[in-house]
Amino acid sequence: MNRRLSVPGSEFTATHSDAWALTSVPPSMIVIGGGATGAQVASVFNAFGSEIQLFEAGPRIVPTEDEEVSAAVAASFRALGIKIRERFGVIESFEKTPTGTRMFFSKDGHRENVEAALVVSAIGWVADTDGLSLGNAGVETNLRGYINVDEFLRTSAEHIFAAGDVTGRMMLVPQAIQQGFVAATNAVNGATMKELDGPAPIGSFTDPEYAQGGLTEAQARANAEVVVTKTPFESTTRTIIDGRTNGFCKLIVDSQTRQILGCHVVGERAVEITQVAAVCMAARMPVDDLAQVPLSFPTYAGVLGLVAAQAARKLNLKVDWQAGQFLDQ
């Protein structure tokens, strides 16, 4: 369920679900919240021709992504005409105007206002569990209404299992399907199957597309000695052929184990590329092994061979495949 703002005049705002149900394109739009959903709304309606202002309370949009990804997406959005306001302050109120809605906000005692034909709030989700009478069944929830589950997806009532968005974990379709299988299996056979804990590719279909798998660079450096390699899309053949050279692929590798800890991509087919990297991470494939897989040419996923070979060389690992000698040219 969409989380709503609780300030005066919030009834004059729409949710991101309302935005997807529009039957016409508003000439202008204020999007509140620069997370994945807000970024999608901003990107889609900018492509449709709306004048977009994107407001993010934090220091950067798409804040759960690697910092370089956030910076690249923000730069691309601005180049496409989206006005981004990070650290904008606090929203005070909204009021209806003859042509739309005006938003009042303030920061450090300075008050401002902006107006658009439509204001869309994309500030997150709350669980839609109020009508389930969970307490009567002994099922506990957290402060936001999500159902608490253990590693077997078992609730506080031992005979009841829960899966998907209602648990408040990774709220994505593939993970919900996977959790559904685990929860149903345990409900029938007893709590024997644990929720799978592998690298999950996560992406957003904005312009530019972006995706991640595993740890960000900051997360990885906090726990291990790593090498980081990055290849710009402008240096790969398929992106040049298609005229989609905006973006990069970044790989983070553990210096000791040679395991791939994270993959981050901005640009065309970012989600598809990251899914390939996630398979390699799930299989615990050493980076030098990935570097020697002759990936099809010319493809977007082929960029993984480039960054893997770069990482292998940084680690002074032998890469036999002869194409590796050309990767830095």
Image (cartoon, helix red, strand yellow):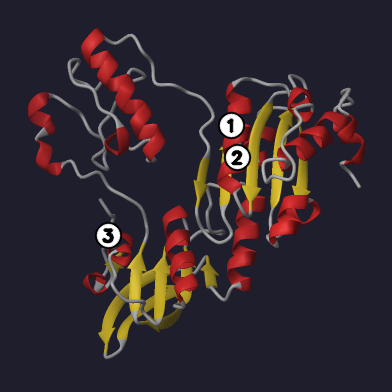
| Residue beneath the point at 30% across and 84% down | 100
Q: Quadrant of residue 194?
A: top left
Labels 2 & 3 near each other (Cβ < 8 A):
no
Label 2 to label 3: alpha-carbon separation: 32 Å
Q: For the residue marked with disc 1, what is the amino acid? A: Ala
Percent across and percent down for residue 316 are 89, 26
Q: Which mark is residue 278?
A: 1
Percent across and percent down for residue 267 are 63, 54
User: Of helix, strand and loop, which one carries label 1?
Assistant: helix
Residue 153: tell me if it is visible: no
Q: How crowded is the residue under tag 2: few (<14 C-alpha within 10 Å), some, or many (20+)?
A: many
Q: Nearer the viewer, residue 106 or 292?
A: 292
User: Of helix, strand and loop, which one carries label 3?
Assistant: loop
Q: Quadrant of residue 143?
A: top left
Residue underneath mark 2: 274
Percent across and percent down for residue 132 are 11, 37
Labels 2 & 1 near each other (Cβ < 8 A):
yes
Q: Nearer the viewer, residue 275 or 8?
A: 275
In the figure, is residue 96 to the left or right of 291?
Answer: left
Residue 307: tell me if it is visible: yes
Residue underneath mark 3: 4
